[in-house]
């Protein structure tokens, strides 16, 4: 399945929760998620750029995080936030956070 994601909403959420992973040219992977950079040489032929292992969510985009992003199954913004926080928390040793964003009023379904 190839579902177009709303960039305006998802970009705000991504930048608020995983700001260090928006614009990079390196591969990162841990037990929870994987991010692969856009393949400039192969004209973006990556099958995905973001993979959340527990949920199976895969997202591909054009050049930069969430630009013309497509995912492999339909998710709500709330589910996307939970996935991003799971990734964020996987980077924190012994810490777990979840912040209610001011943007919640307009992105919540």
Image (tube, grey):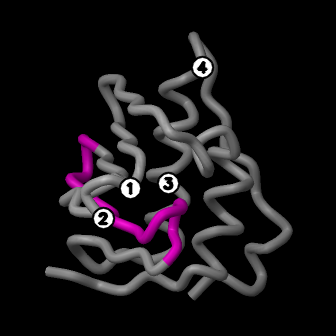
Q: Which mark is residue 43?
A: 2
Instruction: Identify the residue at image location x=50%, y=39%.
Output: 25
**Circle 4 SS class:** loop
**CA gap, disc 1 and disc 2:** 5 Å
Q: Position of residue 107 (x, y in %)?
A: 66, 82
| Magenta-tinted stretch | 53-67
Residue hosting label 4: 92
**Circle 2 SS class:** loop
Dominant secondary-structure state across the stretch colored magenta: loop
**Circle 1 SS class:** loop
Q: Quadrant of residue 97?
A: top right
Mark 2 closeness class: few <14, some 14–19, many ≥20 residues within 10 Å:
few
**CA gap, disc 4 and disc 3:** 15 Å
Instruction: Identify the residue at image location x=25%, y=57%.
Output: 42
Picture layout, residue 88 above or below residue 63:
above
Circle nearer the N terminus (2, 4): 2
Circle nearer the N terminus (2, 3): 2
Residue hosting label 1: 40
Q: Position of residue 101 (x, y in %)?
A: 79, 62
């Amino acid at each position: 399945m190839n579902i177009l994601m709303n960039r305006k909403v998802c970009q705000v959420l991504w930048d608020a929760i995983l700001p260090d992973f928006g614009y990079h040219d390196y591969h990162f992977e841990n037990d929870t998620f994987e991010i692969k950079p856009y393949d400039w040489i192969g004209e973006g032929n990556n099958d995905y750029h973001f993979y959340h292992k527990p949920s199976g969510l895969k997202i591909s985009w054009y050049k930069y995080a969430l630009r013309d992003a497509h995912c492999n199954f339909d998710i709500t913004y709330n589910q996307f936030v939970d996935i991003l926080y799971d990734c964020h928390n996987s980077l924190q040793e012994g810490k777990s956070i979840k912040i209610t964003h001011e943007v919640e009023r307009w992105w919540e379904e």
